[in-house]
Amino acid sequence: MPEGHVIHRLARQIDRTFGGRPVGVTSPQGRFAVEAAALDGATLSGAQAWGKNLLLDFDAPGPHLVHIHLGLIGKFAVGPSVPVTGQVRLRLSDAAHVADLRGPQTCDLVDEDRWRQVVDALGPDPIRPDADPALAWQKVHRSSKSIAELLMDQRIFAGVGNIYRAEVLFRHRIDPGTPGRDLKASTFSAIWDDLVLLMADGVDAGRIDTVRAEHTPEAMGRPPRVDAHGGEVYVYRREGQPCLVCGTPVQRRNLAGRHLFWCPRCQRRHH
């Protein structure tokens, strides 16, 4: 499932390509045909992301917001105008470009009240300038669940996924099993501030890089990482490989249905 930086980058791309202009809206697959017809030819006022949720705002009467969640297999690709191929749930188009949505978990035409319900169920998004980290802290410091579990809870940290979870805990030397209630407020703030920087960089770069300057391939004289899931990282998908800091083999275990990666030597902090 794409992490939040991917959805923010997609919102930016859609906004730059179609924002402020009339847009063709169709559903070649047919499963969104009635809703698409109500929006076809309307101006796209803008696109925005909140965590892993994408919102398209059209200047049209009645419900005019399209709520999209890509889920595990969804794709939304923006590019030059080409004929439709495959099962396209939603197509945005102008004379030169198309944006094709395939396989989303959610593609709904909603009103402002319904979108507010979606947002109210989400935690603050580190990428958004209006995020309030105090809302996340209120839930973290009262919880007996591990910080590794809490970071993946979209009701607490909207947009944080498995890669950012593993990497931010490593960067702050936190044992993933540490209960949220045991974290100091200063540690939480450091984690949040780091997520803000790392995820914003991910939006700009289109990939996840989390290693500090002294641990880059150039600085260490090592080959660059080759992995479709991201760029240079400390522990994610590096099970059995030596930690870039201490050389201890990176470990992996299952936690709440997802793989968790960590260094047992570097990550010993519990507060």
Image (cartoon, rainbow, N blue to C red):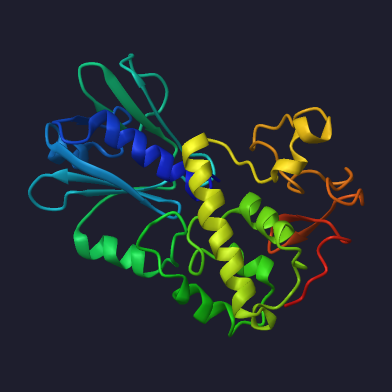
Quadrant position of residue 85: top left
Whether 222 is drawn above or below 156: the answer is above
What count of labels does the image hold? 0
Left or right for 252, reference 103: right
Is residue 210 something one can see in this rendering?
A: yes
Query: Residue 228's x, y, as percent?
Result: 65, 32
Query: Where in the figure is residue 122, as x and y percent of width and height?
Result: 42, 66
Looking at the image, the residue that sits furthest to the left is: 61
Is 30 or 213 nearer to us in this picture? Answer: 213
- Residue at 37% from the left image edge and 58% from the top image edge: 129
Q: Nearer the viewer, residue 97 or 197?
A: 197
Image location (x, y in percent) of residue 247? 91, 48
Picture residue at 89% right of the left edge, 45% below the top = 242
Q: Is residue 126 left or right of residue 177?
A: left
| Residue that extends furthest to the right in the rendered view of this protein | 248
Relative placement, left or right, of 228 versus 126 is right
On screen, residue 23 versus residue 179, left or right, reads: left
Q: Quadrant of residue 186?
A: bottom right
What residue is shown at x 47% (from left), y 38% (from top)? 204
Percent x, y of residue 188: 60, 72
Q: Which residue occupies the foreground of this view, 64 or 227? A: 227
The reply to whether residue 30 is visible in this rendering is no
Q: Is residue 159 above or below residue 231?
A: below
Q: Is residue 161 above or below residue 96?
A: below
Q: Residue at x 80, y 43 (%)?
A: 238
Q: Quadrant of the C terminus?
A: bottom right
